[in-house]
Image: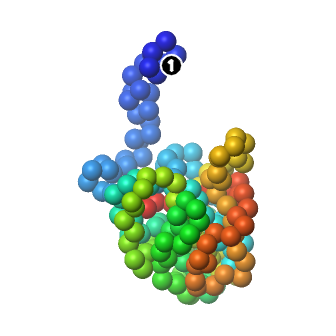
């Protein structure tokens, strides 16, 4: 048995396929993502006016200025409000983007939303990146499917909360409900 358990190969060789998407050099372009760029598909975001938040591991010292979500095959239809927000691991609002109001969001389009106040992370751990869209048709998002927490202490990879939200993020993530569909989010 090795330090790597039963695996006897070169870990970098075995994980090389993860680099096939051409991810930028983390030393050159700061970014954090909750999912790798492989195995993604079109997933439902949340109902209109409902916030979807996803777990995102951030490191001490990270400066998060933007949150990027990517629409899937369905564009936003007649949006009236949408915003992104960053929450602490405890679910307290740290910052949100400006309300995007009626700005179009086409299918298969990355939407980068700047936080009103960039957040310097002071403790490594799980944070939550959230998106709420109020529209006739909520866009689908690029993402994956996750399992419900099973072990004590596990958190949701994705969750929904709130109802009838418009342009302001709630102060806390209140009564989150497990969500199987996990949208991709990229923090820069």
Q: Is residue 21 above or below residue 116?
A: above
Q: Is residue 129 above or below residue 20?
A: below
Tell how many labels: 1
Which quadrant, please, contains the C terminus? Answer: bottom left
Query: Quadrant of residue 121 in the image?
Result: bottom left
Residue 72 visible, this orientation? no
Name of the residue lying farthest toward the left = 28
Q: Position of residue 103 (x, y in %)?
A: 52, 84
The color scheme shown is rainbow
Residue that appears at 72% across and 77% down: 163
Q: Position of residue 164 (x, y in %)?
A: 71, 82
Residue 138 visible, this orientation? yes
Query: Quadrant of residue 42 in the image?
Result: bottom right
Q: Is residue 55 above or below residue 170?
A: above
Q: Secondary structure at mark 1?
A: loop
Q: Taking 162 as reference, is 54 left or right?
A: left
Residue that appears at 65% across and 46% down: 153
**Front one among 168 and 89:** 89
**Front one among 122 and 35:** 122
**Front one among 78 and 99:** 99
Q: Position of residue 132 (x, y in %)?
A: 61, 74
Q: Taking 133 as reference, is 4 left or right?
A: left
Residue that appears at 43% across and 52% down: 124
Residue position marked by numbered label 1 in the rendering:
5
Residue that appears at 52% across and 84% down: 99
Number of residues whose C-alpha sits closer than 10 Å to that of mark 1, classed few (under 14), some (14–19) or many (20 or more): few
Query: Quadrant of residue 83 in the image?
Result: bottom right
Q: Position of residue 162 (x, y in %)?
A: 70, 74
């Amino acid at each position: 048995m090795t330090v790597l358990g039963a695996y006897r190969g070169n870990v970098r060789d075995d994980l090389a396929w993860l680099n096939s998407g051409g991810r930028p050099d983390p030393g050159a372009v700061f970014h954090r993502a909750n999912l790798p760029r492989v195995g993604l598909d079109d997933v439902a975001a949340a109902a209109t006016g409902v916030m979807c938040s996803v777990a995102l591991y951030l490191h001490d010292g990270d400066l998060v200025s933007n949150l990027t979500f990517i629409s899937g095959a369905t564009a936003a239809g007649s949006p009236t409000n949408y915003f992104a927000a960053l929450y602490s691991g405890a679910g307290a609002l740290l910052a949100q983007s400006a309300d995007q109001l009626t700005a179009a969001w086409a299918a298969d389009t990355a939407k980068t939303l700047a936080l009103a106040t960039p957040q310097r992370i002071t403790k490594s751990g799980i944070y939550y990146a959230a998106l709420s869209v109020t529209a006739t048709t909520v866009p689908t998002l690029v993402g994956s499917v996750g399992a419900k927490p099973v072990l004590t202490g596990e958190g949701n990879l994705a969750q929904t909360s709130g109802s009838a939200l418009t342009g302001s993020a709630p102060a806390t993530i209140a009564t989150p409900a497990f969500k199987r569909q996990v949208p991709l989010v990229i923090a820069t």
